[in-house]
Image (tube, coloured by chain):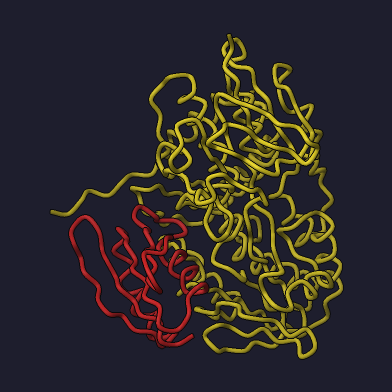
Chain colours: A yellow, B red
Amino acid sequence: MAEQVLIVGGGDGGTILANSLDRRRFDVTVLAASLAHTFQRGFLDVALRGRRPRLVRDEGRLVGSHVRLVHDRATAIDLNAGVVATAGGARLEYDHLVIATGMTTDPSQIPGLTEVNARFGDYHTDIAQAKKLWAHLDTFNGGTIALGQSSPICKCPPSPVEGILLIDELLRAHGTRERTRLVFFTPYPRPYPAEGINDVVAPILEQRGVEVLPFFDVDKIDPEASTITSIEGDELHYDLPVVIPPFVGADIAYEPGDVVDEGRFVITDKESLRVKGSDTAFAIGDASNLPTSKAGVGAHLQAKVVAKTLAGKRATFDGRTNCSLDVGHGRATYVIGSYQAPVARAAPNRLKYVMEWLLGRFFWMSLKGTIDPVFDIYFKVTEPKAPKRQQ
Amino acid sequence: MQQTGSGRTLVDSRGSSCPGPITDLALAYRRSKRGDVIELWATDPGVKPDLQAWASKTRNEIVSIDDQGDKIVAVLKIVNR
């Protein structure tokens, strides 16, 4: 009898995993809270470039015909009993469970942020918020734009730096850059937390005249006074705030309750991807607490590791990241590292920009698995090298 | 990140290179209160200057930074929250 694999979440990780499993061996169910699969990276183009790409596809057309797709939301996962309960009243059992429930923005964690982002928008929540931000940027006529992440966890770690550089590019095109102060705030000691890439982006920010406020960990925002205050006690005035909200894992009641952390991220073994204390449950993508970037590439690679493990092969996740960083003006670089290899210095160029554009074009195919051989070659060629350990 | 007793938090950042151990520290700092102790484990040698800069900026205390070969163990005391 076929083994039952239940994948909770129909995002990138869940979809790639469902399509990677052997249909002769597994009965695959994907429990998806939404059937509108969104290319989230595209929010950047909508919010900061005013483009209107088609970012949403029907999940039913992305998963293979062997996959049973259930449109319902998980409300409780009992790992002891092996049962997932849904908002629609269903109780789903499994032999293998994969939690791929992603993460969402949660502006309520920062006083004042819900009001500010409802007015100005942001480029991490959804398409409507991205369009709202574009409307403000497109008509901005000078003053201070303050951009940064309001919490250390950020979907797509390059996106804050990309945001400020793309706004710089936009304002130069609009002829309003000279009367605009661009301020980039960050909870980290430098603009990009990983030093290899910081060595590349810090000079670009300086050259473009972007002020950087390091160690600026947002405490609260005062929409009346138009100020952002940090835990460290600094205050920043804005005319247009572009504040990346904090993120949280899905609102699911777990049994046992200690498999999620304070941010509702599932505590996951960083190599086997098994949920803490469980032999039958895995977590992949943004839903996990893995010490690596929250990005689509992580979900992709982790899905492949779980697919191999379920197929009885030996597989571990090596912490690989591969995030593009668009520095504007048609150039990009890549943030590549792993658990063993620190992020390497990589200069931006036109070729990497074209590669990023191509990856965007091939995104939907990558979910279906039709271009897996290309990805296999790409990841092998670009594999980061671990430094030799000093004795 | 786990609570290991009253007001003491263990942050295991070993193997984290991107975004890096400073991300985990920033998160622990957000959730801390005055008097708490944060013990940070890291393998990235860049964590040492980052911690010194962090303590200087946030006016918190580095109790110790100990390179144990397989990991760097830093003990930090939150005195400014």
User: In this picture, is A102 found above or below A63?
Assistant: below
Q: Where in the figure is residue A186, as x and y percent of width and height?
A: 55, 74
The spot of residue A387 in percent (x, y) is 27, 49
Which residue is at the front of the view, A100 or A90? A90
> Which corner quadrant of the image does residue A18 belong to?
top right
Q: Quadrant for residue A199, please give it.
A: bottom left
In the image, A22: left or right of A341? right
Judging depth in this view, the residue of A365 and B67 nearest the camera is: B67
Residue sitting at the far left: A391
Q: Position of residue A319 (x, y in %)?
A: 43, 45
Q: Residue furthest front?
A: A81
Residue drawn at (79%, 26%), measured in percent from left and top?
Answer: A61
Q: What residue sits 47% from the left and 65% below the top? A: B23
Image coordinates for residue A185, horizontal then vertical, percent: 59, 77
Q: Write the residue at 38% across / 58% down.
A: B13
Q: Is residue A124 placed above or below A367 in the rendered structure?
A: below
Quadrant placement of the C terminus of chain A: bottom left
The quadrant of the image that shows the N terminus of chain A is: top right
Along the line of sight, the residue nearer the viewer: A89 or B77: A89
Looking at the picture, does residue A21 appear above or below residue B59?
A: above
Is residue A334 visible from the viewing direction of this image? no
Q: What residue is shown at x 58% (from left), y 83% (from top)? A: A230
Is any atom of residue A95 visible in this view? yes
